Image: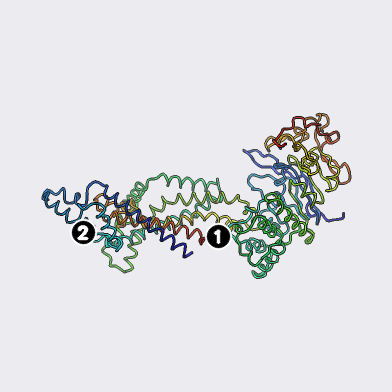
Amino acid sequence: MLKFILRRIVIMIPQLFLLSILVFLLAKAMPGDALTGRLANNPKMDAQTLAEMKEKLGLNDPPYVQYVRWIKNLMQGDLGISYIHQQPVTDLLSERIGNTLLLSACILILSYIIAIPLGIVSGRWTNSLADKLIVGYSYLSFATPLFIFALLMLFVFGFILGWFPTGGSVNIQVEKGTVDYYISKINHLILPSLSGALLSTVGTIQYLRNEIIDTKIKDFVKTARAKGVPESRIYSRHILRNSFLPIAAFLGYEITGLIGGSIFLESIFSYPGIGQLFLQSIMQRDYSVITALVMISGLATLLGTLLSDIILSAVDPRIRIE
Amino acid sequence: MSKQPILQIENLRVSFRIHDEYYAAVDGVSLTVNENEVVAIVGESGCGKSALALSIMGLHPLERTKLEGTIAFKGKNLLPLSVPQLNQIRGKDIGMIFQDPLTALNPLMSVGRQIEESMDYHTKLSSSAKRQRTLELLKRVGIPNPEKTYDRYPHELSGGMRQRIVIAIAIACEPSLIIADEPTTALDVTIQAQIMGLLKELQQQMKTGIILITHDLGVVAEMADRVAVMYAGEIVELADVNTLFSRPLHPYTRSLLHSIPSVQTRKEKLHVIQGIVPSLQKLPRTGCRFKSRISWIDESEHEKNPILREVAPGHWVRCTCYKNFYFPQDNIGDMNYGIS
C-alpha cells in the first residue's frame, strides 16, 4: 500500500513537469503581458521607460530562460509576486485558500446530505411519486445555470428578505476569535453553500439511483432474501453497500474540486476565495497568480485520482493495492 | 412409501405482468415432495422450472407477479404469507441453491459472514458459536482450509468453491427442504460431478427433501427419486426415475431422452427437437401445448383439453398423443445445425 502510494507520487513528478510546461506556454500565449494591463495604457508612461521595465523584469529573455527561472522559483515554493496586488502570490493564496476550502467543504457535505437520502428513496421505490419528484428535481437542478440560480438566491434571501449578508466571508467589524465572529462566518456561508449544494446533487442522486436499481435485481440479493434476511437489512447490508462504491470512488475527485473552488459562486457572492481571485487574475492578466492557481489545481487533480484509488481499495475487497 | 409429504403444491399458477397483462409461466402445476425425497424438475429453458422454484419461497418481484393455487409447506400454505412471515421460513426450513455461483454471492462480504448471516435471523447462537458452526459447514461442503476461507471474499475463490459456499448457505440452518435451481449449469463438467456428489451426500446425511431443477438428464438419473417433466408451464409427465428412463411415454420426454448424445452409437446428426419453447405471450393456452413441435402427429391423436392421467401406479402423463407417437424415420424437416 505504502509502496503503491509512493510510486504514484513519483509518477506525479513528470506529470507535473509536463503540466508546468503547458501552463507556461498557455500563459505566454495569452495576448499582452504583465505590463499591458496596468502601465501600457497609462498616458504618462513613455515607451522607453516601458521597455526598460520590460528588460528589468526579464520579459525580453527567451522563453526557455523565463521558464527555467519560473520553475526554479516554483520548486523553492516561490510563486512569484502578483503584479496587480503587489504582494507575493503565496501570501495572496494563503489568505483565501481557507475560505475556499471552507465553502467548498460546506457545499460538498450539504450536497451529500441532500443527495444521498434522495438517491436511496428514488432507487428503492422506483417509479413511485417520490421517485418522480426526485428525478424531476435532479433534472431541473441539472438544467439550471448556477450563476442565474445563485443570483436569484442572493436577490431573494439576501436583498429582498435580508436574511443573509450579500457578500464577503465575515463581518469585518466583528473581532476575530469571538463567538460572534464564527456566527458571522457561518452566516456568510449559508447562502453560497446552499446555492451550490442544491445544484450539485444531480450526479450523486442519479448515480445512487441507478446503482440501486441495478443492484437490487442482482442474484446475490436473491440469495440474501432466500436466507430470510429482512428487507431493511437487504438494503443496508447488501444493496446499499454495493451501490455506494462509485460514489465513494468519486469522493477523491470531489475533494479535488474543493481546492479549485467555485469560480461563479465566489464571484457572485463576492466571497474572497481562490475562485474569485482566479477570475480577477485572468481579466487583469496577473500571470503569476494564474500559473500558480493552475499548477495547484493540477496537483490537486493528481492527488484526487490517487485518493479515489485509495478510497476504492478501502471499500471494495476486489480492488487491492499492492 | 409411507413418507410424510413436506411440500404439497396444488394447482399452482404463476403469472407475470407484461404490459398490463398477466401471462402464466407456471400453469396448474401440482406436485408433492416427501421427506428425504429428491424430486427433479426437467425441461428446456423457458418452460417454467425456475419460475416454479422461485415461487415456493416467494422470491418473485411482488409487484408484477400473481400467484394462485396453494403451496403447502408442512401443511401450511405459504402463498398468503407476508414477507416478514416468509422470512421466518426462508433459510431456516427451506434453503435455496442458485444457478450461478459467480453472481449469487455478495462481492463485498466475506464468505464466512455470508454463511453466518442466516443464523443471525434464525438462531440465537452467540457470535463465536456461529463462527464455529460456519467453520464446520465449510468443512462439510468440502472446503479444504475453513479457517482461512472464512475471511475470503467471493472473487478469491473458484467457481466450484463458490458453489460449495452457496450450498453451505443453503444448509446453514439444516432446512428440511432444499430447492436447487440448476446448481451445476454454470460449472464445468468435472466440477459438476463433484458438486452433485456433495449434494447427494448431504441429502443422505441430513435427510432433507430436494427439489432439483435441471435440464441435465444425467444428473437426474443419478440423483432423483421422482421426476417431473415440464413443458410450457405444465407438467407433462411425472414418474419415478426408473420408470421415466425405462418407459418414457410423453413425446416431449421421449424427445428429450432421444436428444442425449450417446458415446456408443455415433450418429451423423444429433437429434434436435424441432422449434423452440414458445415465449410466454405466445404460449398456447388450450389443447396439447407440445403439438406444434411434433407436427407429423395427426391432430386427432391429441386431446382437446389434455389432463394429467395416471397410466400406471405413480406414472402420470398428459394428453393422449403419446399412444401412437413415433419419431419420423429420417427426421423430416429436421434442421441441420452444422453437426456432422
Residue at 49%, 46% in the rendered image:
A135
SS under mark 1: loop
Instruction: Pinpoint the chain carrying mark 2.
Output: A
Give the tally of numbered discs. Answer: 2
- 2 and 1 marks in contact (CB < 8 Å): no
Disc sitting over residue A317 in the figure: 1
Q: Tag 1: residue type? A: Pro
The answer to whether residue A286 is left or right of residue A311 is left
Image height check: is B290 above or below B30?
above
Q: Quadrant of residue B23?
A: top right
Residue A136 image position (x, y, % from top left): 47, 45
Residue B28 image position (x, y, % from top left): 76, 42
- Taking depth in this image into account, of B73 and B230 the one nearest to the observer is B230
Q: Is residue B282 visible?
A: yes
Q: How is the image coloured?
A: rainbow
- Taking depth in this image into account, of A170 and B29 the one nearest to the observer is B29
Q: What is the distance, in whole Å, between disc 2 and disc 1 at their CAs?
A: 52 Å
Residue A306 image position (x, y, % from top left): 44, 58
Disc sitting over residue A86 in the figure: 2
Image height check: is A176 above or below A65?
below
Residue B59 image position (x, y, % from top left): 67, 51
Instruction: Pinpoint the chain carrying mark 1.
Output: A
Nearer-N-terminus badge (2/1) = 2
Disc sitting over residue A89 in the figure: none
The answer to whether residue A35 is left or right of residue B314 is left
